Image (cartoon, rainbow, N blue to C red):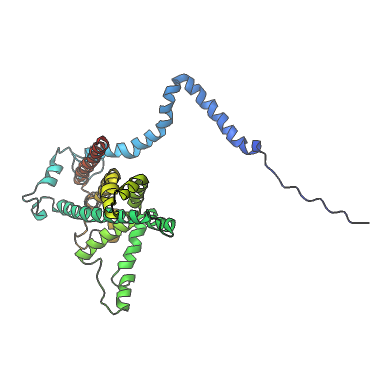
């Protein structure tokens, strides 16, 4: 007798009803809870119910600390408890802003604050200028039909995905004097080691360079989106009028890209003013006070020297600067839209 073949197992198929059963149960539970609530408060007020969790998170972790910081700025003492902090009015702000010569931080009552302010201003000018120029050049290059354009776009954006602390640790290893990768290459080609993080000039340069390297991809992406939004017909019309590439850029690209450039400028300024994490890991404000910036001054004053009132007052000054930058961005955007 011939052996009968064993029946082959049939593939198990899941019906759509079985897959959707958990979601159906959840939807039924949501209806059971939300329908009575909707009848109670009305359909139009349900939007407030769904926004409430975000409002609670915002209130607890953002609004409440802002209010406490404002109160701390007008009190003094080393205690963190509110009842142990006497009210001193604007004393902290007056000490921050008192200087015999505002161009010389040594003549100021709080000289470290003004040293941080001058360092921050220098950093902002250098970093934002380099950031915008390099981002614009990169965006213009990536907007052209080059080979591997998608790969290069991803590569330029990849550093943005890294944590600022990770970026600082990688570059700190590269720039170390004794065992750093860059100094090892210099020695290998017969050159002397350079104390990149131990000399003020080199430290300031590398802080700016690393910041530009790690953030440039974000601004390049914004400018690239602005470039792609420019109609091609504009370039065709300029070409028919006999314009070369530089004339097309000056007459077509740059004017139409200005709204995007304004956004990039303000975002870069706000980020630069708030620089902290990369510099804290890379140089910790050194050598000396060469890379001490405003946010690190606030951190040191509050958490190392335990002068919470002075730290809060400095953060209020920083908040006013950021508010001015934000309002300026809104005004420029509205003027450009009106034009």
Residue 86 lies in what quarter of the image?
A: top left
176 up-or-down from 165: above or below? below
Residue closest to the eye, 257 or 86: 257
Residue closest to the eye, 256 or 305: 256
Residue 77 lies in what quarter of the image?
A: top left
Lateral position of residue 54 relative to residue 11, left or right: left
Q: How many marks overall? A: 0
Residue closest to the eye, 70 or 6: 6
Q: Residue furthest bottom?
A: 190
Q: Residue furthest left?
A: 100
Lateral position of residue 8 relative to residue 80, left or right: right
Report x, y in % for residue 136: 30, 53
Report x, y in % for residue 178: 30, 73
Q: Residue at x 29, y 80 (%)?
A: 190
55 up-or-down from 228: above or below? above
Report x, y in % for residue 78: 21, 46
Q: Residue furthest right?
A: 1
Report x, y in % for residue 194: 25, 72
Residue 222 visible in rendering: no
Q: Residue at x 29, y 47 (%)?
A: 252
Q: Which quadrant is home to the C terminus?
A: top left
Q: Residue at x 56, y 31 (%)?
A: 27
Q: Which quadrant is home to the N terminus?
A: bottom right
Q: Residue at x 44, y 20 (%)?
A: 41
Residue 46 visible in rendering: yes
């Amino acid at each position: 007798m011939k052996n009968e073949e064993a029946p082959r197992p049939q593939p198990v198929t899941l019906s759509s009803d079985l897959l959707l059963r958990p979601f159906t149960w959840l939807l039924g539970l949501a209806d059971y809870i939300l329908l009575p609530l909707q009848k109670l408060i009305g359909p139009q007020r349900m939007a407030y119910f769904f926004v409430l969790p975000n409002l609670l998170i915002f209130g607890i972790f953002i609004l409440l600390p802002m209010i406490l910081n404002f109160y701390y700025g007008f009190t003094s003492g080393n205690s963190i408890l509110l009842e142990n902090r006497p009210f001193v009015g604007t004393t902290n702000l007056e000490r921050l802003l008192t200087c015999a010569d505002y161009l010389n931080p040594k003549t100021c009552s709080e000289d470290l604050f003004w040293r941080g302010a001058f360092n921050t201003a220098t950093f902002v000018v250098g970093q934002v200028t380099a950031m915008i120029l390099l981002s614009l050049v990169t965006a213009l290059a990536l907007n052209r039909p080059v080979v591997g354009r998608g790969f290069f776009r991803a590569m330029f954006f990849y550093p943005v995905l890294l944590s600022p602390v990770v970026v600082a640790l990688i570059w700190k290893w590269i720039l170390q004097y004794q065992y750093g990768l860059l100094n090892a290459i210099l020695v290998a080609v017969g050159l002397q080691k350079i104390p990149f993080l131990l000399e003020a000039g080199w430290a300031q340069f590398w802080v700016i360079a690393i910041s530009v390297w790690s953030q440039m991809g974000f601004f390049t992406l914004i400018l690239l989106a602005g470039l792609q939004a420019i109609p091609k017909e504009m370039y065709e019309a300029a070409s028919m009028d006999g314009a070369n590439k530089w004339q097309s850029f000056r007459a077509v690209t740059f004017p139409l890209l200005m709204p995007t450039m304004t956004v990039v400028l303000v975002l870069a300024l706000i980020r630069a003013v708030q620089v902290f994490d990369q510099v804290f890991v890379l140089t910790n404000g050194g050598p000396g006070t060469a890379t001490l910036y405003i946010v690190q001054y606030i951190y040191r004053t509050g958490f190392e020297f335990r002068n919470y009132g002075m730290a809060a007052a400095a953060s209020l000054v920083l908040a006013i600067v950021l508010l001015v930058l934000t309002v300026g961005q809104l005004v420029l955007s509205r003027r450009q839209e009106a034009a």
